[in-house]
Amino acid sequence: MKTFVVLGISLAAIALSTAPALAADANGNHEAYVWVVAGDTAIAPDGSTIFIKGRGTLEAGPQGSATGGGTFSINGGPIGTWKATGVEGFVSYGTSLPGSALPPPPATGGMAKLHVSFSNGQVGVLTIFCVIGSPPPSVGEGIHLILGGGSSSEYTDEGRGFTIFIAT
């Protein structure tokens, strides 16, 4: 009997200790969030940079939507505007840093893919990463932006900045 109790406790401990490492199922998340890019730089393979700032809302799930926008600058040039036109998907990473109670909910980590349009006529997909919770090990805080103009329009390396999602 003692063996069964120890085995049961061990299995429960394993299940509980691995649960936070799993990202939320994207198909099961239909929550609403405020997203914030408080000023973030992404870098293209040729070294060009884009600085993006903005905020808005998104509704996760199959019928999801996104609103909001902000400003941008390519290679430190003139400032333009951009807006979110839709949401491709959102995956929640959870609500606190591993081993900590901070930040408190409703601050949420995750990855959002937003369809965006820019005042210079370009359109693309902006991916926002916030590493609160339990993100995959290869994910860093920041943004990626894929525009339709070749590799110099693929800003896929995180530079520096701060992003966050707030569950509403």
Image: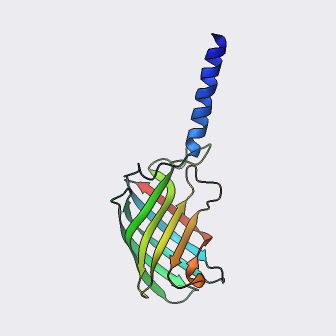
Q: Quadrant of residue 141?
A: bottom right
The image shows residue 6 at horizontal and vertical percentages of 65, 18
Question: In the picture shown, does residue 122 fall above or below 95?
Answer: below
Residue at screen point 60% across, 21% down: 8
The image shows residue 70 at horizontal and vertical percentages of 42, 76
Question: In the picture shown, does residue 29 fall above or below 112?
Answer: above
Question: In the picture shown, does residue 71 fall above or below 32?
Answer: below
Q: Quadrant of the N terminus?
A: top right
Q: 93 or 163, which is in the foreground?
A: 93
Residue at screen point 57% across, 66% down: 142
Residue at screen point 47% across, 73% down: 125
Q: Quadrant of residue 101?
A: top right
The image shows residue 163 at horizontal and vertical percentages of 52, 63
The image shows residue 147 at horizontal and vertical percentages of 50, 80
Residue at screen point 49% across, 48% down: 24
Q: 165 or 38, which is in the foreground?
A: 165
